[in-house]
Amino acid sequence: MARWRSPGISTRIFINLFMLLCATFAIGLTSIWYSVQFNAMLNQVIEKDMEALQASREMETELASQKGFVTYYFLDGDPKWLNELSVHRRSFMKWFQQAVEVDQNPEHRILLEQIHETYKRYIADKDKVIALYQTGDRKAGEALHWKVREKFFELNDICLRYKQANELNMQQVRDESHSRLQRISVVVVIFMSTALVLGVLLVFFMFTQVLIPIRQLSQKTAMDDEINSSGNEVRVLSNHVRGLMENMDRARSELEQSQAMLVNSEKMALVGKLATEVAHSIRNPMTSINMRLFSLKRNLELTDFQKEDFEVVSAEMRRLDNIVSNFLEFSKPHKLKKQQINISRVIDMTLDLLCYRLELHSVSVVRKQSADLPPIEADPELLKEVFVNLMVNACEAMEDGGEIVIREEAAFVENIGWAVLVKVSDNGPGMSEEVRTRVLEPFETTKANGTGLGLFIAVRIVEEHGGTLELHSKEDEGTTFIMTFPAAGGQ
């Protein structure tokens, strides 16, 4: 203690201040370094590994989609089945080429070579089967057809092994990410503990060596006006303490921002994997449904009303495919196809689409439209997705039926100018403050089987159109979503 007391008070304070700033600076550098490393790894996953995984799954899907077309052709002789087969063959080769371009793993390259050679033999033999069917030699074609099926299963097995190899690679990347996060957390905790100890030590010195002596000095100067030499030193010390507190607040704020960025980055990586798994699970049954619809439409004599129903089903299948594609691109910005539209028309189409669902939930809709609404520049399909999401949520919230009120009006909004406001209100149970504060965040949901992405995607779509989406809700008082869209040309 005698050796520590030998330096002056200013020296002791500045030493502690320097050590505290070093610890804080180390925390910042560590967070920045990890952010850069994590971003580089995330870019590799998104740009290379995710593309390779997607290609492997799409190859498996396209290979499965080729199964059955030659049999259909054998049954009814319609050349359209061969055209469909050609489409899926080209799609398979497109995904195979993408896998070859992005996947540089030596073991994966060997599997890709096996897929390529096996697929060439499989295609050649299947073309022979088709040729035999076309020449009328059905017996020989059918015999060769059974042998070709064995090659199909061999090829499918290789594609499966390639997909599993890519999934294993993704799992290894995830494990490495968690390991890095644990290591950096330990380092940050050590630095934060050091900063805390230094901060406590600095406070101790401030009380024992600064505040008490200053109080004593103040009392003394009150009695003795000649003691003026300490005035400048006190001012300097006060300025240093104030600056130290500001630096600590700023460092804590930067650390919190860095941690939030790391959490969001990991969520985006998980979303990419979730998107490919969902798309893989949905597209296979969608392909089967489309094939059956096509076959039914060709073989059944339908009334005009039934044909209209078939067109609606086909349109909705296309919309499902569009939703799956958007989900795959969740971690990327939407490619907006903007055009000048009347938002009332988009809401009309949404209500037409949801008429059966609204009737099923015993929900009525009340429209309150202002005259002469200005047009907006927007992608109608994406806006329809937003309105569908909000109204379906409202229907599910009002379990015993209720009323949805849609208000459309023009208004002048600060920082936007002239804008179109759409308010979607329901008289459901509303939300608690806790739910309301987090429901617009990704992966937050109140539904047992929900993904927690619907409202988050709706917010992002509105913001990508230059607008805003606000939520107002109280328990037992219903829920209101207010969307603001800039008017086209600032009208």
Image (cartoon, rainbow, N blue to C red):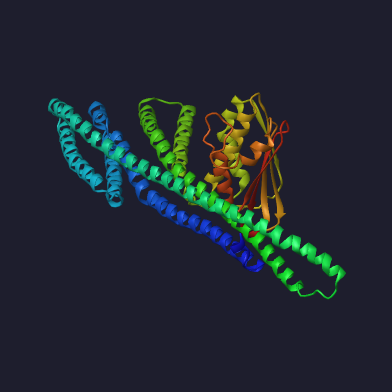
- State the residue in front, 162 or 483: 162
Task: Name the residue rendered at 59%, 56% in the picture.
Answer: 198
- State the residue in front, 410 or 390: 390
Q: Is residue 319 left or right of residue 236?
A: left
Q: Which image quadrant for residue 57? A: top left
Task: Name the residue rendered at 46%, 57% in the picture.
Answer: 33
Task: Name the residue rendered at 67%, 53% in the picture.
Answer: 419
Asked whether residue 464 is in view, the answer is: no
The quadrant in which the C terminus is found is bottom right
Residue 277 picture location, percent across and down: 40, 37
Q: Is residue 352 left or right of residue 104?
A: right
Residue 141 picture location, percent across and down: 15, 29
- In this rendering, the answer to whether 211 lies above or below 444 is below
- State the residue in front, 381 or 200: 200
Residue 177 picture location, percent across and down: 42, 46
Asked whether residue 296 is in view, the answer is: yes
Q: Which image quadrant for residue 131? A: top left
- In this rendering, the answer to whether 198 lies above or below 123 is below
The quadrant in which the N terminus is found is bottom right
Question: Which residue reaches farthest right?
Answer: 223
Task: Name the residue rendered at 42%, 48% in the picture.
Answer: 180
